[in-house]
Image (spheres, rainbow, N blue to C red):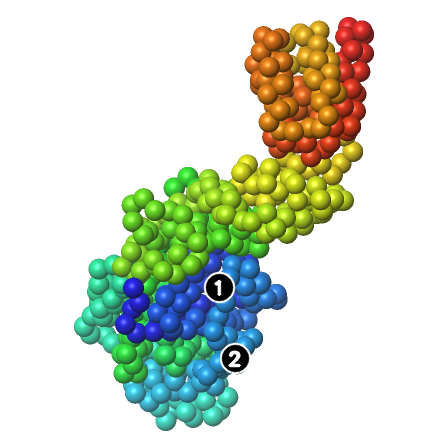
Amino acid sequence: MLDPQPARVRFAPSPTGRFHIGGARTALYDFLLARQTGGQFILRIEDTDRKRFVPGAEDEVMESLHWLGLDWDEGPDIGGPYGPYRQSERTEIYRQYAEELVARDHGYYCFCTPERLSQVRQRQQKLKQPPRYDGLCRSLDLDEAQDRIDGGEPYVIRFKTPREGSTTAVDLLRDPIIVENSTIDDYILLKSDGLPVYHLAAMVDDYLMKITHVFRGSEWLPTFPLHVLIYEALDWEQPIWVHLSIFLNPSGKGKMSKRDAGVKEIYVLDLKQMGYLPEGLLNWIALMGWSYDDHTEFFTLEELIEKFSLQKLHPSPAAVDYKKLDHFNGNHIRLLSTSELVDLLRPYFKREGLVVDEEILQQIAPLVQERIRTLDEAVEIAGFFFKEAAEPETSELIGKKMTIDESIEAIRRSYEIIEGVLTLEVETLEKMLRALAEDMNLTAGQLFGILRIAVTGQRISTPLIETMVVIGKDEVLNRIARALDMLESYAGAA
């Protein structure tokens, strides 16, 4: 059911590092609400922190979002009616609103040097007081301030936080946050280099871009009351604020960090390289902060757009469970058509230097589809199709709980059965080999295990009988004969 009003939402990353799953979840929720309500999803780059700027980070954000299928309606690359969409191109706008706050007596010019501020902090630390600006310039006469500015003295613009009363900040997922104004610092809004900080720039942009809902991380909760005060100081209507839950590391003990990823990654493009589908990744992150009901977990992007609701978001921390990612990804792989899977698998085989036979790839795609959780797992279990027959370890050709002689007999009789059939057909061949196992008082697993090593050179592979059919009768016989020679030589030398 659509919300009554189209939502305008923005995803506003800072190009200060790689694009990870936390950012992807925020972008997903933005996208879902916009598409569900017939609104707009906006990409805005918050690049005013030049010290932490990382070249290429903006491109990685865009590449990741495109791969995930989260395409935006307005942004730095395509423009829109509320541009520019890079904050570094909007600095004069922020200065205008910083000056307006000063004019409204909700901001002031501060000329304190870094050295003085450091001394203030040291003094506060000795007195075990919370670090904050001591307000030296708060009451400075505007004419005097202007004279100092005209004289070339460096300055910042600070927010003039009310000293009395309290501020109530309302977040959709939590009880109202009520903070005494006396505990809120006079934060810097405009730095001495003329660039804004987040507290000013994001508020101005959200207002001017007519953002209706702000999804962001819960790390902004401590300064949330300041943002409310800025809106109130400028007589602006606030958006609906949604501070999303934090990610816990896989153990569930402590906030997820880059060091906790372990064998998995947290960066979207790295997960792509590891063989995850965008559909699997989106399904996974959607459920880390939202749920549809207490039992439905599998969603396509179209289903997420239909079923997503703000009311089902929750603030509870979510452990990053990579087993669930594997589960969801495997399920989405099962939904692919053979041609889709072939196109997705091809690069993974080629990445390993394998020369891909297209006809064989078409045949093996259905064989791996039910068994893999990530695309790169197909190389592990089916890469042998594109290699010359591997030479297995002779010891591996000895069946489980079997002697060398029993293994030799099993291989010899298997060879005779395969040699005797006109063509390899799955149902017929499987029935004959199972009958052989029974006649030799073996389990099917014992016999098939030996033959799997002989034919594929590995213990884990695509289904044995289907694999034989793809490889072809002549080559299967060659490989089994070679395995038989290896075992007989081994027995003779023993």
Q: Is residue 172 left or right of residue 150?
A: left
Residue 340 drawn at (x, y percent): 59, 52
Q: Is residue 443 left or right of residue 300?
A: right
Residue on which the image places disc 2: 79
Front-lying residue, 489 or 268: 489
Q: Eyeballing the image, is 484 above or below 423?
A: above
Residue on which the image places disc 1: 70
Residue 343 drawn at (x, y percent): 64, 52
Q: Quadrant of residue 27?
A: bottom left
Which amino acid, by three-letter code, is at mark 2?
Gly
Determine the residue positioned at 51% across, 62% down: 69
The label nearer to you, 2 versus 1, is: 1
Q: Eyeballing the image, is 394 above or below 387?
A: above
Give the SS element for disc 2. loop
Q: Is residue 319 left or right of residue 260?
A: left
Q: Quadrant of residue 375?
A: top right
- Work out which quarter of the rendered image holds the N terminus and state it: bottom left
Residue 269 drawn at (x, y percent): 57, 55
